Image (cartoon, rainbow, N blue to C red):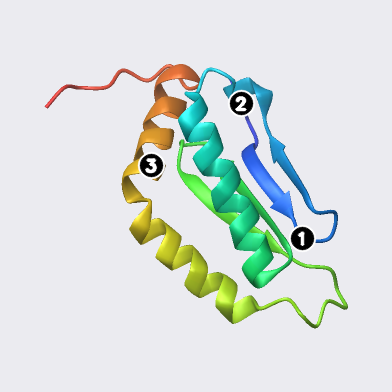
């Protein structure tokens, strides 16, 4: 169905904006709120732009970038923050990957 990476959501410290892909409108409101908080807090702490993107196989990735002359962007801090979020929000991130695989990639999920 999809060939490229699909952006779930993102935030920019430069434009002070949050983006949510409406293709995922079926997600529960509580999860949408949690994603917004996650993205906005991330860029307010380290700067730059953060997007959460699904790879072709359904893996959810954190993509971080910054403008070329942004000396306030904390590249090391962003890497540490991503690892912390992946640890703290492991269940949420796994659920989002499962949602994507079932509803977008039409994968059959085996019950344990």
Q: Which residue is at 11% across, 27% downward? A: 112
Residue 54 visible in the current orientation: no
- Asked whether 51 or 12 is in front, the reply is 12
Query: Residue 6 sits in which quadrant?
Result: top right
Q: Which mark is residue 92?
A: 3
Q: Which residue is at 47% across, 23% downward? A: 28
Q: How would you rate the neighbour count of disc 3 (Cα within 10 Å): few for under 14, some for 14-19, many for 20 or more?
A: some
Position of residue 4 relative to residue 11, above or below, is above
Is residue 69 toward the left or the right of residue 58 in the image?
A: right
Q: Which residue is at 43% across, 16% downward? A: 106
Q: Residue furthest left?
A: 112
Per the image, label 2 sits on a secondary structure element best described as loop
Q: Earlier in the sequence, mark 2 or mark 3?
A: 2
Per the image, label 3 sits on a secondary structure element best described as helix
- Structural distance between the alpha carbons of marks 2 and 3: 22 Å
Q: Which residue is mark 1?
A: 13
Q: Which mark is residue 50?
A: none
- Asked whether 111 or 9 is in front, the reply is 9
Q: Which residue is mark 2?
A: 2
Q: How would you rate the neighbour count of disc 1 (Cα within 10 Å): few for under 14, some for 14-19, many for 20 or more?
A: many
Is residue 59 toward the left or the right of residue 24 in the image?
A: left
Per the image, label 1 sits on a secondary structure element best described as loop
Q: Which residue is at 45% across, 43% downward? A: 59
């Amino acid at each position: 169905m999809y060939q490229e990476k699909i952006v779930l959501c993102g935030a920019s410290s430069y434009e002070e904006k949050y983006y949510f892909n409406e293709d995922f409108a079926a997600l529960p409101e509580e999860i949408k709120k949690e994603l917004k908080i996650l993205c906005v807090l991330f860029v307010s702490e380290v700067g730059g732009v953060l997007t959460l993107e699904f790879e072709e196989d359904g893996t959810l990735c954190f993509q971080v970038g910054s403008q070329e002359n942004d000396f306030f962007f904390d590249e090391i801090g962003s890497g540490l923050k991503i690892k912390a979020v992946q640890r703290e929000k492991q269940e949420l991130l796994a659920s989002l990957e499962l949602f994507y695989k079932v509803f977008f990639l039409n994968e059959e999920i085996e019950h344990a």
